[in-house]
Image (tube, rainbow, N blue to C red):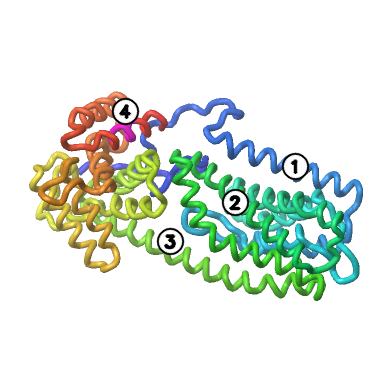
Amino acid sequence: MTQRQTEGPRPSDGRPIGPEGGALSHQRPRGPIWRTSRPVRAILVAAVGAISLAALVWTSAIGFVEPYVALSFCLVIAVGELVRITLPGHREVAPIASAGAVGYAFLLSLGEGPSLHSPWQVVAVVACGVAVGELPHIAVGRAPRVEDVARRVLSAGLLAIGFRPLAERLDFSGPSVTATLLMFALVLAVWGIDGLLAALLRAERLRTRLWVAVRDEMRAQFASGVAIGSSGVLIALSCTVTGLAGLLVFSAPLLVAQVAFRRHAEVRRTYLETVRALSRVTEVGGYVENGHSRRVSRLSHLIACELGLAEADLLELEYAALMHDIGQLSLREPIAGGATVLASPREQRRIAELGAGIIRETGVLDSVAEVVRRQCEPVAGDGDEGVPPLGSRIIKVANAFDDLVGENGDAERRSAVLERLRMDAGSEYDPGVVDALAAVLERE
């Protein structure tokens, strides 16, 4: 087996990467700095940055209303950003910071009179708090996803724009049913806007279909959105009675919830890392070439995004693609180069069956085992079971492409392999999956 160099670090330019793996083609020269493959992200970050700077300058020029209150909320937001967490799907959230921002946007009074700070001041305070909270992360090399930070500032600004003028005109000097209903209505509206914006950014990053991204984001953000919105409203209402003590009292439950979210994310991350480590057993044993499983997993992820698979299906596909060759551990002698595409159909099915059997031993990955078991079947299926799952058809194409191209295949070789796959499309390979592969290669 030819030993290959270990793959380099993952790109940090926002390309759609699920599993780790090397690039599909040689890196092209960068274009001018103003050209980007993610214009929505660039526009969002630039617009929110400019608005935040303008709000800070304007508020500083005219003076802060109730500066001690503004400083208190700014510090809570900064602490919330400092303890932000990353949820499954690479979503960065800061529940305490977001709830503090919502509470400041809705603040009615502190028991002594109405709070009359402007929407500009809300944006300035939230932006300062976010910036201060992110500085320690940046100092240790954990730069935030700027689009997620921009969304948090934008959401607070939209809430302030919708509520602060009404609070002054209608004289909401204290808690009332009307004020509470208005707060929840605004939270619901802004949550919907933020979800759509997050979906648009996700579709742009993963090159997937917008409606799929909308569904995934709404499902992923529902629980955290309810907790953050409710806590923010409670902070604003409680401060009217208890003063700034309400800010701390109603931030505590969010801290407990955040710990639970963090543990869930760590368990899922550990589970994925375990699967990745298991997939390397075939490489260490010399059954497949170094990096093959990660490259097949990454390519399968890109093809699946092109086809519009949902987030849950992407995770299942990632597990299956990482472990698609684990059945080779049962072979007495490795296949030459580890390329199962060059083995006989009978041998391919035997490897797939053995791999599925190993995966089923875990007791929790039966659906992944089924995808692995049927990865070698022709596109119409084998026997009475019908057409193989889409995940199996994707892995079949991705595995064949990587087996025939390898890590550093040139453009001519990639084109030749793609044409070969197209010749067998309709019989061995799913034509739609092959077309998606062609689109991925062209974009890469």
The residue that disc 1 covers is 51
Q: Amino acid at mark 4?
A: Asp
Q: Earlier in the sequence, mark 4 or mark 3?
A: 3
In this view of the protein, which residue sits in the foreground, 62 or 194?
194
Whole-number angstrom distance, CA of label 3 to CA of label 2 = 28 Å
Q: Is residue 431 above or below residue 399?
A: above
Mark closest to the chain's N terminus, 4 or 2: 2
The crowding category of the residue bearing disc 1, from other C-alpha atoms within 10 Å (few below 14, some 14 to 19, many at least 20), is some
Q: Nearer the viewer, mark 4 or mark 1?
A: 1
Q: Label 4: few (<14), some or many (≥20) within 10 Å? A: few
Q: State which tag comes first along the sequence, 1 or 3.
A: 1
- Whole-angstrom CA distance, mark 1 to mark 3, is 36 Å
Q: Are marks 4 and 3 in contact (CB under 8 Å)?
A: no
Q: Amino acid at mark 1?
A: Ile
Q: Which residue is mark 4?
A: 410
- Where does residue 99 sit, x and y in percent of width and height? 67, 63
Residue range of the region highlighted in magenta in the rendering: 434-438
Residue 251 at what x, y percent from top left? Answer: 68, 70
Residue drawn at x 76%, y 62% is 179
Say whether marks 1 and 3 touch (CB < 8 Å).
no
